[in-house]
Amino acid sequence: MSDSNESLIEAARRRPWFRLRLPGALEAAFRATTRVSPGGYLQSWLLVFIAFNVLSLKMDFDVFGAERFAVPAFLTLCVFTPLTVAGILALHGSPSTDRQATVVIGTALIDMTVVLISAQIAPVGHADSYRILAVVVPLVVGMIAPLSFRHCLIFCGSAFALYVGYVTAFVLPHDAPTGLPLLIASLVLVPLKLAYSREWTMKEAFLLTMEKARRDRDLAEANARLTVLSETDALTGLSNRRSFTANLRTDWLGALDAGDWIAVALIDIDAFKRLNDTAGHLEGDLCLQRVAGALRETAEAEGVRIARYGGEEFGVQIPSADLSRARVIGERLRAAVAALAYPHPGLGRSGHVTVSVGIAAAHGSIAAFGISERDLLKAADDALYRAKRGGRDRVEGALLTLESANSDGGPTPQHQDAG
């Protein structure tokens, strides 16, 4: 997460209670991640709503009598019920929040209108019961329906306006008491507080989730950096010895499983101590960096892994390569350093930095007999010393076999001429 988004989260967490909207792009992100309730939830409640209104016809019959019952029955069965059924059909699948809100608001206002019409034509003494029932409708719907605060504000405002309009048009002109109707009207606003608290809680949970995700990501990045640092040589940027030996162990076991060849190369800068003694350690570090760069470039081109093995020595893992193939790669690595023509003050004016390379290869099948990657490294180390004794700036190879590894109680690799 960027610093700007990080500061937005902090600002959002500090916003005052009366500011429901999140700052900046966080509001849009919240809307995008807010789960849309399945239509089945509201469909089931609308069916209950229909059942409630149909059952209430018995009360209408008792209040209006057989002769005047036709009006509320018509409004319930021929107006409210068909429109509510249409709303249920419109909520099929996973409708958008706007569609859900439209169905909920429309159905509730229609039912409220039906009840207010019944209140207007109800016999004397029964009007207040219907007026109370008209307010109960939006009160219950606002508490049940998962409306956003914005939609709830529209719903409650419309219901309040409808009720106050009814009182103004039909109650006030008859000088009827208005205290109870207006008190009842205020109940319409109760769902607003519930919707506000619900959305505030959801947004706080959203911010906490984003904050946790940011911290988890920062921790993962920090761990990744620590892993890189623990496996990387600070001077050359190559993998370090710890990483090299771990990867070689994995490749050795992989060669056993696959029945494949594996090779390793050890590379040592020739007369490096003389360079340090002559030009100083800063020049020695620069030399290590230049040589490491040349070796890295060649290793990447060959598809092999290289690491700083220690001091002026480098290690190269060469999977799926027999001795012949490994020696070709070793020669290319040697030539890459020679091509640098990097001056070596300890060897005179015409002296240049060179490397000696020791190669060892083995077939993975010998690992089944207790031969380990350490034996392979020992064979490469022996080959490296032969290259040193043979005049430096050269490649020597060794083939590690079961017989040679077990001779004299330890690995004694067969030597192969560097040619």
Image (cartoon, rainbow, N blue to C red):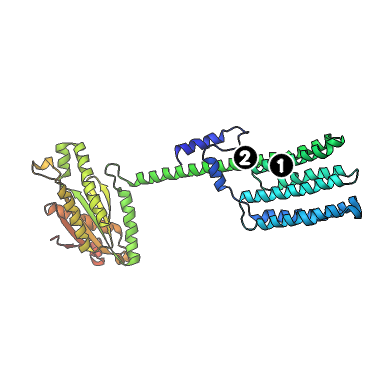
Residue position marked by numbered label 1 in the rendering? 158
Which residue is drawn at the image coordinates 53% and 40% (left, top)? 26
Residue position marked by numbered label 2 in the rendering? 200
State left or right for residue 308 relative to residue 127. Answer: left
Q: Are marks 1 and 2 in contact (CB under 8 Å)?
A: no
State left or right for residue 46 relative to residue 36. Answer: right
200 or 55, which lies in front?
55
Q: Position of residue 45 (x, y in %)?
A: 72, 53
Is the residue 384 above or below the residue 158 in the image?
A: below
Is the residue 92 above or below the residue 123 in the image?
A: below
Q: Residues within 10 Å of mark 2 (few under 14, many from 20)?
A: some
Which residue is drawn at the image coordinates 30% and 42% (left, top)? 234
| Location of residue 331 by image quarter | bottom left
Position of the C terminus by quadrant: bottom left
Q: Which mark is residue 292?
A: none
Distance (Cα) linking label 1 and label 2: 23 Å
Q: Residues within 10 Å of mark 1 (few under 14, many from 20)?
A: some
Q: Position of residue 282 (x, y in %)?
A: 21, 36
Which residue is drawn at the image coordinates 21% and 40% (left, top)? 286
Which residue is drawn at the image coordinates 25% and 52% (left, top)? 315
Q: Earlier in the sequence, mark 1 or mark 2?
A: 1
Q: Indicate the secondary structure of the residue bearing disc 2.
A: helix
Amino acid carrying label 2: it is Trp
State left or right for residue 419 relative to residue 102. Answer: left
Q: Position of residue 357 (x, y in %)?
A: 19, 54
On the question of residue 12 being in view, the answer is yes
On the question of residue 56 being in view, the answer is no
25 or 408, which lies in front?
25
Q: Position of residue 253 (x, y in %)?
A: 34, 61
Amino acid carrying label 1: it is Ser
